[in-house]
Amino acid sequence: MLGFTPNMKLYSLCVTGGLLLFVYACFYSESIRPVLHDLGIINRKSDIFNDNDAKDNTTCGLLLLRTLSSHHPSKTQNKVLPQGLLYKKPSVVSGRTDVVSVTPWMAPIVWDEVFDSVVLDSIYKKMDITIATTVFALGKYVLFLKDFLHTAEKHYMVGYKVDYYIFTDRPGDVPNVTLAEGRRVRVLKVPSSNRWQEISARRMEMIQTTIESTIRGHADYIFCLDVDSKFHAHFGVEALGRLVATIHPGYYATERGSLPYERRPESRAYIPFGEGDFYYGGAVFGGLLEDVRTMAEICRRNFEADTANGIEAAWQEESHLNRYFTYNKPSKLLSPEYLWQDVAGRSKHVKIIRFSGVAKNYADFRPN
């Protein structure tokens, strides 16, 4: 067997050292530490591994590598504009002044008039992307599917490949809706539940496992949407991002101290007073597959930890979602245009309603 030459040894040492420094830097970066903390693998105060919670060093290493891999560039992030496209010249000195369109951590907030669909479509349509879309229609909620799908075909990601993943305990009641070319409905049968809180609790687990078992390799992005909703206007690729949250329409102008976060320190969804940014709605969230998968796994584990301790967060899944987004900042925020409520009046800030929850009597649809 041939031995290493001095040059080969030096090269090997440099590569190994570089990899160790890279992992060390990533472990101590703000984007990685909160993820490891929420999984219980490090302690927030000391930033050390909790050996009791991690089975072995392999578990820790796989988690770190999985987290890092979700931030690698992909074809979906290249924005190349074709030559000869004509569109309105953008301006840095004029535009909307009634709303804020960027967060303190430099994530865009998507409002009407801050994007150009012509420009975005000319970029994204060349990428041949697929958007997975999960919808939960259990019990009587299956009755909302027809309007959801009909309006989605008119307004949601029009011109792009979309796979609707419908989770339901009544697959025979899923309506037959005509879909555009390249768009499919996939029905996934799930057990019924006697409590709507349990349905909410299981949603993150089913999103996580379905990404791992079915969606991975077949889609670039995923959006998770509530079925008791309708599309009213354009909802397109301007919404795509690495990790996308939606500002809840009922609290977008509410002071931090009045946001309905989970305030009990005993809960894994706990957000202390003085912390938090916005209140995010659980009816619309999404992003790249691996980022959403990681988020769903952490929310599921935190939910299960609460259940084991006899705690149910104030707003179940939505409370855990807000906890996650508080310490793992979304890369893009959708304004309340993308998550309105039909029972609410119009707002001077919301010039167009793109997606909204329909007015209903919850007692007629929820099992408890």
Image (cartoon, rainbow, N blue to C red):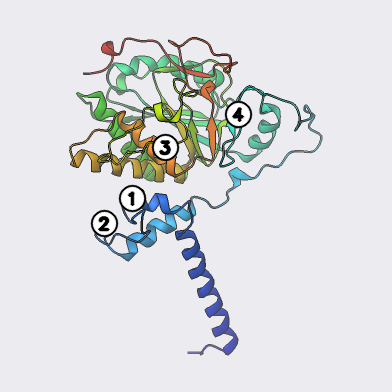
142 or 236, nearer to the observer: 236
Q: Residues within 10 Å of mark 3 (few under 14, many from 20)?
A: few
Q: Quadrant of residue 108?
A: top right
What residue appears at the point 58 percent right and 31 percent down from the top-left corner?
Answer: 109
Q: Left or right of 88: which side holds 58?
A: left
The CA distance from mark 1 to mark 2 is 9 Å
177 or 248, nearer to the observer: 248
Mark 3 or mark 1, which is nearer the start of the sequence? 1
For the residue marked with disc 3, what is the amino acid? Gly
Which residue is labeled 3 in the image? 274
Measured from the top left, where is residue 71 in percent x and y?
52, 51
Closer to the observer: label 2 or label 4? 4
Q: Is residue 108 visible?
A: yes
The CA distance from mark 2 to mark 3 is 29 Å
Closer to the observer: label 4 or label 1? 4
Question: Is label 1 in contact with label 2 (beta carbons under 8 Å)?
Answer: yes
Q: Residues within 10 Å of mark 4 (few under 14, many from 20)?
A: few
Mark 2 or mark 1, which is nearer the start of the sequence? 1
Q: Which mark is residue 39?
A: 1
Closer to the observer: label 4 or label 3? 3
Q: Which mark is residue 100?
A: 4
Closer to the observer: label 1 or label 3? 3
Q: Left or right of 297: which side holds 6?
A: right
The CA distance from mark 2 to mark 4 is 41 Å
